[in-house]
Image (spheres, grey):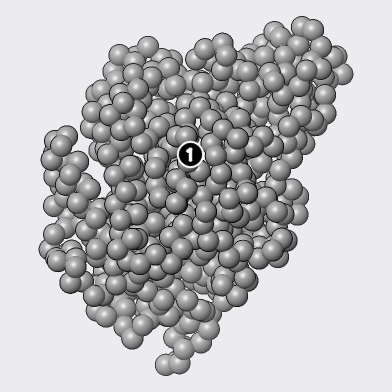
Amino acid sequence: MPSLTDSLGSAPKLSTPLEQGGNPVARTHLPTADEAVAHTLLNCLLREVSGPEHQTVVTDGRLLLRLPRRGVLLRVALRRTSLLGAHRFTGPVSEQRDGDWTEVDWRRLAEYTHDELALRTGVRNEEFLEQIASSHEAVATTLATTRGPSASASYSSSDNRLSAYLASEQSLLFGHRFHPTPKARTGDPRAWSAYAPEVGASFPLRHLAVRADLIAEEYADASAVAPLDRQRTDVPEGYRLLPAHPWQYETLSGHPLLRAALDRGDVVDLGPGGQPFAATASVRTLYDGESFLKFSLNVRITNCLRKNSSYELSGAVALTRVLAPALADLADRFPGSAVLREPAYRTLALPGPDGTPDRALFEGFGVIVREGLPQRLAPGTTPLLAASVADEYPTGAAHISRLLDGADERAALDWWSAYLDLLLPPVLAAYFDHGLVLEPHLQNVLICVDGDGRPAQVLFRDLEGTKLVPDHHADTLAALPPEVAAPMTYDAQRGWDRVIYCLLVNHVAELLAALADLHPGAEAALWARVRATLDAYAEKFGCPPRMAALLAGVPLPAKANLLTRWERKADREAGYVRLPSPLAEDVLGDATRATAPRDTTGGTR
């Protein structure tokens, strides 16, 4: 792969206690797959079911959690409590039986969760337990797999920045800790592991040569398709190159219309080749050091089938066009931030029996071009996936414990303030000033650090989650086809909930938790720095009602991933539960005197 070292200098000199040639941390430092699945289910139950119904209590270093409809009382030991109720668990889960505590495995806990949700909602979900089992199998497979060198690359001065970045993308062994099936994927793990980021997958693309009149594409400017065209030079005259994810090609290769087109010569299978691409954390988005390509995969990952719908293909290019003025303004006002554009897509438009392009092939082979890091990355910085920096466990060299390398509490707070100054203002200004709903959750943000590991820039990515508030963009939306415009909008309140969930609950709270793991007595001080950054933004740029309510400590929205998965809803239709806010002044008090977190689960310590 091309090296970023030549143009950007050496990687930061940071501590990297990695195992030589193997996994990034000793296995004894990680939970088992059984524990990881059980703890994730407890997180979901605490946040969405038992917590809101005041069926939890923290006492004697343990969380007690009751499933009232199922009539089960559960218990787990705590490593640390949390002001937001996002506690850290350790060891097995137990249930009370006849006055005694008996260990309960992840399968029984999953069944209890299934039964509680069925009794609560009055409906059943036959695939729920199967998806939890799939997630468990994926975690177990990953933990048992020896990872290649690129997946465990270290931050020594001789390593290039691209390796450091890809290592961060490929270090998420357990996934979202507030999602019931964070690693669920349809299919046999032994088949998809060849393409999975967790095992350091890197592979050549499959390439199709397609008659030019059977290609559909849009682009913001003609040069935007160059990352597609440069993959191969052996394309016959009159044909266009269509790169495909090899897993997706295998999935769709038996489609009758594609088989017929191959037989006629309208499509030519050029086979695998070209520069290898590495899998990023989303699985279907791949990177070769120059450009990101976001492919469709007919695979359910967590909630959804990960294919690029036709409106998403057009929507990515449309957003790249219409957001240009807003993004230019944000870049000018907040030079420590940038958004990766998605300026082109290309796909296969083979006509079906009705003469229109077959939808399964059109969407199945759709590939979106996303700008690569060289276009937006600040000189002298190394990009790291925020989810890897904030991971509950130090599974990679990008983890905050490695970035801080034993720094004291004051240094950790300084690092935190520097990062908040980069992250919060552009997201808030995008919403308030431009009616733009960014989705800055941990997997959509890159933390770009300087040679000392300090935050110097943030990069936002993935326009699929970016939405427009109609009141700000009525003319723009009216000019787009309704099937493209409708999915790219949120009303003002739903957009605000999405922004605050992604920004504060998913992102800030989780990275703060990782810092608090290093300095448990500093949690209140860390939240005080969040409030101080928000106060500074309000003083400089204004304090509209929603901002005032945030600073007053109104409950924070947390996406209900468990209930959304149970009800089989699309992600944009997800509901929210409300969490007690740690931002209110009466909660924080004098952060410098805070010596211990308080319980927010409805009980007492």
User: Where in the figure is residue 35, as x and y percent of width and height?
Assistant: 55, 72
Q: Quick check: can you spot residue 212?
A: yes
Placement of the N terminus among the 4 image quadrants: top right
On screen, residue 528 versus residue 92, left or right, reads left
Q: Which residue is mark 1?
A: 380
- Between residues 398 and 182, which one lies in front from this camera angle? 398
Q: Is residue 459 above or below residue 477?
A: below
Location of residue 89 (image quadrant): bottom left
* Residue 554 locus on image (x, y percent): 18, 53
The residue sitting at 27% across, 26% down in the picture is: 434
Residue shown at 64%/37% (left/top)? 3
Is any atom of residue 580 visible in this view?
A: no
Please tell me whether residue 437 is drawn above or below residue 44 in the rendered image.
above
Q: Secondary structure at mark 1?
A: loop
Q: Quadrant of the C terminus?
A: bottom left
State the residue in front, 221 or 458. 458
Q: Amino acid at mark 1?
A: Gly
